[in-house]
Amino acid sequence: MESVSYDRFTSPEAEINNTGQKFIHVSGRQNRNMYIIYGVLVLYVFILTLAVGIKISQVSREVADVRLSVESVVGSIKKGPETLQFENAQFSQLLMPEHVIPEQGPCQENWVFYKDSCYFQSSLKKSWQLAENNCIQKGSHLVVVNDLAELDFLSSIVKTSNSYWIGLVEKEKDKWSWVDGTDFSATEHHWEEGQPDDWDVPLNGEDCGQLHARITSKRRRLWNDADCTLSYPYFCESKPKSH
Ligand SMILES: [Ca+2]
Ligand SMILES: [Ca+2]
Ligand SMILES: [Ca+2]
């Protein structure tokens, strides 16, 4: 019987050629190793691809964020002044009466036109009687507030935070009248809450009407009775000359 001696220097392949069983065993181990290596490589490539993908996604998002920020900043710079003006306008509207741009219309210089009357707003302060005298010199009277629309117009054009004399006077106790003879009982009354109160009765009392300095939530200046000897700015009212 032919014996097969083991030659430790024989190459695996030679050994394989002599023993079919061993050939299969060694070849299977090589294949398994190759599969493992291949698997590890595939896994490595997969992880690498995944990592790169995630990184690219993060970078893209960051780029998008930066782009949005830049656009936002550029937009603000481009319309910065307009934005500020708009915000200021909103701010003023909350605090101040609605601004009306008065027109001269058919009225004389320094007077403004509304509906069918001309109005003069004084810059000087005078007592009620001197104010009325000054209006008369101008061919007018202290303003007669006939209705709410006229009151709101006056409220919208006042230039200072002062109270303003109007053509309302209490010639007898509890008998108020308009300077131009208009029937007081026939016109709307727009007194501030708690007015007329004839405050400070022991001295001069309060017998003259004014648009009070307080601006209501409706941007309106309501009436107050005040001491006629005190000096306030005032409104005169007249008809246009053509009337
Ligand atoms: Ca009037
Ligand atoms: Ca009074
Ligand atoms: Ca009063």
Image (cartoon, grey):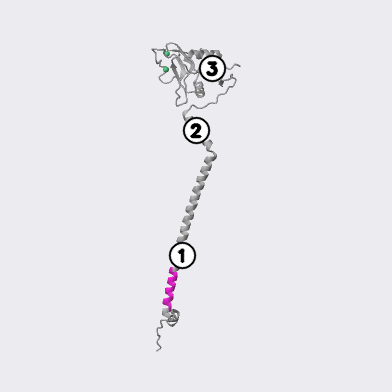
Q: Secondary structure at mark 1?
A: helix
Point out the residue furthest to the right here.
242
The x, y position of residue 208, in whole percent, is 45, 14
Q: Are marks 2 and 3 in contact (CB under 8 Å)?
A: no
Q: Amino acid at mark 3?
A: Glu
* Magenta-drawn stretch contains 25: yes
Looking at the image, which residue sits at the far top?
172
Mark 3 and mark 1: Cα distance apart in space: 95 Å
Mark 2–mark 3 distance (CA, rounded to whole Å): 33 Å
Name the residue beneath numbered marker 2. Answer: 88
Residue that label 1 marks? 42
Query: Where ligand 2 lies, by quadrant?
Result: top left
Magenta-highlighted residues? 23-36
Q: Which residue is mark 3?
A: 237
Residue 80 percent coordinates (x, y): 52, 38
Q: Quadrant of the N terminus?
A: bottom left
